[in-house]
């Protein structure tokens, strides 16, 4: 059993769909590897099947990742077992079946079980379909609220999360929007973090978010140059497909995300 007194990590590295550089996205091996690497959050996407099962997949169908196209909302959990969630990754990376065996689409409950085995890496959940109520019910049944957060651009979904449990972190995804209005809305609703699309991130936007006593983040960033630039600008969080690279960059700089916890403690308190 994990030590319940061990605090969660705080290094600002979110493994986007797990370690999806070295393993098929949104699969149990990708999530296990991200936890082993030491990220503080793993991010995943949720759809609801025809038989009301919460499955971890980004797209509404299995065609891109699974080779065989099945519509998730029209399929049962058993139906989805026909899809190989490693097919696209294997082909794109010239892997053999021996090097990259078939993977099935996991259930959210399976990933939460991984998180419950330890206390340092938490799960950021993005409800891709209308399934927030089902997700919250599952979290309650598994007593996993301490191990989760939520990310999405839909304010209604994120407001529902905060109404359910105000202490659960929300990472609000924004793209080509009014930053001033977003900051005001986030503060009014208790959202902790504004995640900007990488094309919208500037040093000024980061500082504007931080001056409002919110965390500033970027999604989804993989290029070494862009990662280094964001670290230099003092961003709080980065979603990346390559968490090992980002962790190495943080370590080599002895600053950036991995070194922000002490700096955050020294920031002046925001006064409205």
Image (tube, rainbow, N blue to C red):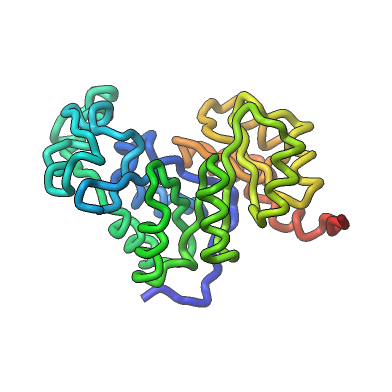
Q: Position of residue 202 (x, y in %)?
A: 72, 28
Residue at point 51%, 56% (across, down): 149
The residue at 40%/72% (across/down) is 143
The one nearer the camera, 222 or 207, is 207
Q: Residue at x 31, y 34 (%)?
A: 60
Q: Quadrant of residue 264?
A: bottom right
List x then y, in percent, for residue 215: 68, 48
Q: Is residue 272 above or below residue 244?
A: below
Q: Residue at x 42, y 67 (%)?
A: 144
Q: Confirm whether residue 18 shows in the render.
A: no
> Would you say residue 203 is visible in this rendering?
yes
Choose top left, top right, bottom left or bottom right for residue 189: bottom right
Please state which of residues 217 and 150 is positioned toward the viewer in this rendering: 150
Q: Count the labels in the image.
A: 0
207 relative to 6 in the view: left or right: right
Q: Position of residue 62 (x, y in %)?
A: 24, 33
184 versus 91 height, above or below: below
In the displayed structure, 149 sits above or below 175; it is below
**Depth check, front residue: 63 or 28:** 63
- Residue in front for this viewpoint, 125 or 15: 125
Q: Which quarter of the figure is the C terminus placed in?
A: bottom right
For the N terminus, the image quarter is bottom left
Q: Image quarter for residue 169?
A: bottom right
């Amino acid at each position: 059993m994990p030590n319940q007194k061990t605090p969660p990590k705080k290094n600002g590295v979110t493994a986007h769909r797990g370690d999806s550089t070295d393993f098929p996205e949104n699969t149990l091996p990708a999530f296990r590897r991200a936890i082993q690497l030491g990220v503080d959050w793993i991010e995943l996407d949720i759809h609801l099947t025809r038989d009301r099962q919460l499955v971890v997949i980004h797209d509404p169908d299995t065609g891109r990742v699974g080779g065989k196209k099945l519509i998730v909302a029209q399929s049962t959990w058993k139906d989805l077992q026909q899809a190989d969630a490693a097919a696209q990754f294997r082909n794109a990376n010239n892997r053999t079946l021996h090097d990259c065996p078939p993977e099935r689409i996991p259930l959210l409950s399976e990933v939460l079980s991984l998180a419950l085995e330890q206390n340092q890496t938490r799960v950021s959940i993005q409800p891709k379909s209308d399934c927030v109520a089902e997700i919250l019910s599952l979290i309650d049944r598994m007593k996993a609220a301490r191990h989760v957060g939520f990310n999405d651009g839909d304010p209604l979904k994120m407001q529902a999360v905060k109404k359910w449990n105000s202490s659960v972190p929300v990472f609000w995804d924004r793209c080509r929007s009014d930053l001033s209005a977003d900051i005001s809305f986030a503060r009014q609703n208790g959202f902790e973090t504004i995640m900007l699309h990488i094309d919208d991130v500037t040093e000024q936007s980061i500082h504007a978010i931080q001056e409002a006593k919110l965390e500033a983040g970027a999604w989804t960033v993989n290029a070494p140059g862009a990662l280094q630039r964001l670290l230099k600008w003092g961003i709080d969080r980065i979603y990346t497909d390559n968490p090992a690279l980002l962790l190495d960059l943080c370590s080599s700089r002895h600053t950036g995300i991995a070194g922000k916890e002490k700096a955050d403690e020294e920031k002046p308190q925001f006064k409205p």
